[in-house]
Image: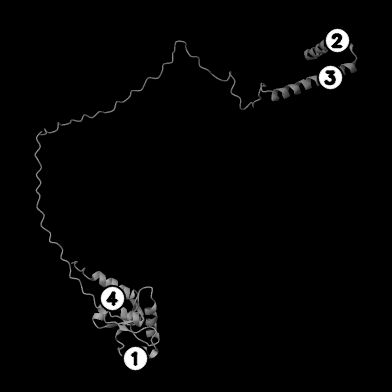
Amino acid sequence: MSKHRKKSAAASSMKQVQSSSPLASLPASRTRRMLGQLVGLLAASVVLGFAFNLSSPIGIPFKDASSESPSLTEVKTSPVPASSTVLPPLPQATKKPAVRQVVVSPPPPISTVEKPIVRQVTPASPVAPPVAAPAKASPPVAVNPSTTPAVPNPAAIHWADAKPLVASGQAVLVDVRHKAMYDAGHIPGALSLPETSTPEEFTAFLNQHPTNLTLIVYCSSTSCSQSARVAGRLVTQYQRPSVKYMTGGYMEYQQAELANKPAQPTP
């Protein structure tokens, strides 16, 4: 019965509240409309609040309940007595390195007077000069006649080389100038054979002298070419094996002999 009475009392109190509230005087349809608008405003404000909290840097971050630290009620703290003071740690004692005592003995006394160092120098023994080994005689080189240079024929010659050949009888002088010039003056011992002589005269002259005798032809001077022409004819036309011609001619002979001739004393 007590429970029934309590329910009836609560129902009567609710009716009194509804009758006393300003919404009780309003019709039911308008009341429901207002309640729906209030619920919509409340939901929109909650959604906007969550969105602003997530986008704003100053919003409250949401954490998982499992990762949260224990509440203050669960943490048991032991009160620190006021009389107790925290002492700093005692400094550790540093070990000093072991020091070894080394006893240094004094050096022996050094005498101020130094003894001179005497060096014995032994005289060097005389060295005999090296004896040169006797030079070995080189074997004679065989001369191949085919490799010896051929002597030109006819060949040019000067009076200094022609004079010893004539004096030794190995050569004979041939004056090829005109007969009048030969008679006016010629080298002693020279034979006259003018360039204008006939072939018979050339043949008769050559028959008087053997072929192993050298013929030395000369004319007037270096400006004269008769000696070279006649020497060429004796080689090519008459096949004489040894013919020479004096390039300076009779003038070269005169200059050489006058230079070697002693000066005559003046009276």
Which residue is labeled 3 in the image?
37
Give the amino acid type for the residue marked by disc 4 in the picture. Asp
Q: Please identify, in this view, whether the residue under mark 2 or under mark 3 is nearer the observer.
A: 3
Seen in the picture, residue 135 relative to 150 is either above or below; the reply is: above
Q: Please identify, in this view, whether the residue under mark 1 or under mark 3 is nearer the observer.
A: 1
Secondary structure of the residue carrying tag 2 is: helix
Q: Are marks 2 and 4 in contact (CB under 8 Å)?
A: no
Task: Describe residue 213's horizontal placement relative to residue 26 as left or right.
Answer: left
- CA neighbours of label 4 inside 10 A, class few (<14), some (14 to 19), many (20+): few
Image position, residue 66 (x, y; %): 62, 27
Q: Please identify, in this view, whether the residue under mark 2 or under mark 4 is nearer the observer.
A: 4
Q: Could you tell me how far apart the alpha carbons at marks 1 and 4 are, in whole angstroms?
A: 28 Å
Q: Could you tell me how far apart the alpha carbons at marks 1 and 2 are, in whole angstroms?
A: 192 Å
Please tell me the numbered disc located at residue 161.
Answer: 4
Please tell me the numbered disc located at residue 22.
Answer: 2
Q: Place residue 105 in its image quadrant.
A: top left
Give the amino acid type for the residue marked by disc 2 in the picture. Pro
Q: Please identify, in this view, whether the residue under mark 3 or under mark 4 is nearer the observer.
A: 4
* Image quarter (top left, top right, bottom left or bottom right) of the N terminus: top right
